[in-house]
Amino acid sequence: MSDEARPTKLDLAGELALKRTLLAHQRTLMAWIRTSASMISFGFTIYKFFEYLTTAESIRPAHHLFGPRAFGTGMILVGVVALVLATAEYQHTVNEFQADYGLVLRSVVGKIAALTAVVGLGLLLIVLFRI
């Protein structure tokens, strides 16, 4: 095994700095999850509110190029895409840390991000297919 393939051994200060860096990456992904969940839920709420308003009140919506359904779909799509990109970046960083320092990370943050993305995709399908 060459020196380049061997994980770097850290002293205590370096190990603590690495742990702080990993925790900062987890906090960043959690912030992306929170932001994405807000965008997804806001988009779905806008869609459902105006759908309810048009059916319950018998209000005929004005014909616009960009209505509540398109706005809701856009918000949900932006939230899901942002979450997928943030999760991919997080996973890339974790893989680099594992290769460089031999760390094996077990974190619930990635699982929460995946669950949020699945829920967002489900809501996107509901809006797109008017289920």
Image: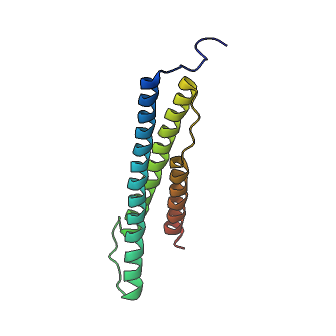
x, y percentage for residue 10?
49, 21
Residue 38 or residue 106, whichever sits in front: 106
In the rendered view, tell whether residue 28 sits above or below residue 60: above
x, y percentage for residue 101?
54, 25
Q: How many marks?
A: 0
Q: Quadrant of residue 41?
A: bottom left
x, y percentage for residue 60?
35, 82
Please, which colouring scheme is shown? Answer: rainbow
The residue furthest bottom is 57
Q: Quadrant of the C terminus?
A: bottom right
Residue 90 or residue 26, whichever sits in front: 26
Q: Which residue is pictured at 33% across the width and 69% down the height? A: 64
x, y percentage for residue 88?
51, 41
Left or right: 83, with 106 as reference point: left
In the rendered view, tell whether residue 36 sits above or below residue 100: below
Left or right: 18, with 68 as reference point: right
Q: Which residue is pictured at 43% across the width and 52% down the height? A: 33
The residue furthest front is 12
Q: Which residue is pictured at 43% across the width and 61% down the height? A: 40
Q: Quadrant of the N terminus?
A: top right
The residue furthest right is 1
Residue 34 or residue 17, whichever sits in front: 17
